Image: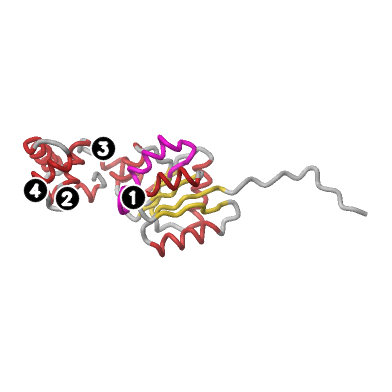
Amino acid sequence: MTDTPDRGAQPSAPPVRLLLAEDQGMMRGALALLLGMEDDMEVVAQVASGDAIVPEALAARPDVALLDIELPGRSGLDAAADLRERLPSCRVMILTTFGRPGYLRRAMEAGAAGFLVKDGPVEDLAASIRRVLGGETVVDPGLAAAALSAGPNPLTARERDVLGAAADGATVADVAARVHLSESTVRNYLSSAIGKTATRNRMEAVRAARRQGWL
């Protein structure tokens, strides 16, 4: 007697394809191992720098990209915005140590579908990935409440650019060359950023903006 196939059986769905962007090798490896143990997930790409995210995603075609924010080469938030344009089928989740309200707002503006901090259990992360694939937006609840109370980022895009270019202590002339503006315009933007952050100088403004996740 020969076995007959179960005509009612349905083929299993392909695993969720994941890209991980994390500059700490141990953290990246542990995350890949733990997520790879989920029956319905497969890590298809891993990168350690922000400027490798988009090229690797275009090559690997992941369903979900898990991105850290502070990466060498390029911010995960900037890469998220590019992924939305160049690979709209890929859902982006920000997974970061820094639960700052300004980061959350910027992530949502960049088209991210999730924002979680790294101190949660991997089971919760896996569940959040599935929810994101189902069309939901998943945000750490404590951070969502903090973002609502913190209000919007007061810095304009140009003020952020200039303040970021000045973060290493560069002179006004150097900053002007980096952002392709005149020195007088740079001074105006720096003065405005210092006023909006209620600080005394550009370095204090940089630190205040970073604490809030505005920069």
Kindly identify the amino acid type of the residue bearing the numbered disc 4.
Thr
Dot 1 falls on a residue whose secondary structure is loop
Residue 3 image position (x, y, % from top left): 87, 52
Image quadrant assignment for residue 36: bottom right
User: Does label 3 or label 1 sit earlier along the sequence?
Assistant: 1
| Label 3 – label 1 distance at C-alpha | 19 Å
Q: Which residue is mark 2?
A: 167
Q: Which callout, 3 or 2, points to the residue nearer the camera?
A: 2
The amino acid marked with disc number 2 is Ala
Which of the two discs, 3 and 2, labels the residue nearer the N terminus?
Answer: 3
Magenta residue check for 159: no
User: 176 or 150, which is in the foreground?
Assistant: 176
- In the image, is residue 35 above or below residue 5? below
Q: Secondary structure at mark 2?
A: loop
The image quadrant where one finds the C terminus is top left
The CA distance from mark 4 to mark 3 is 29 Å
Of pointers 4 and 3, the one earlier in the residue sequence = 3
Instruction: Find disc 1 in the rendering and name its residue.
Output: 69
Q: Earlier in the sequence, mark 1 or mark 4?
A: 1
In the picture of the structure, the residue carrying the numbered disc 4 is 171
133 relative to 175 in the view: left or right: right
**Disc 3, SS:** loop
Identified at 52% across, 50% down, the residue is 127
Which of the two discs, 4 and 2, sits closer to the camera? 4
Q: Is residue 174 above or below residue 154?
A: below
Query: Which stretch did the figure color magenta?
Result: 71-92
Which residue type does callout 1 highlight? Ile
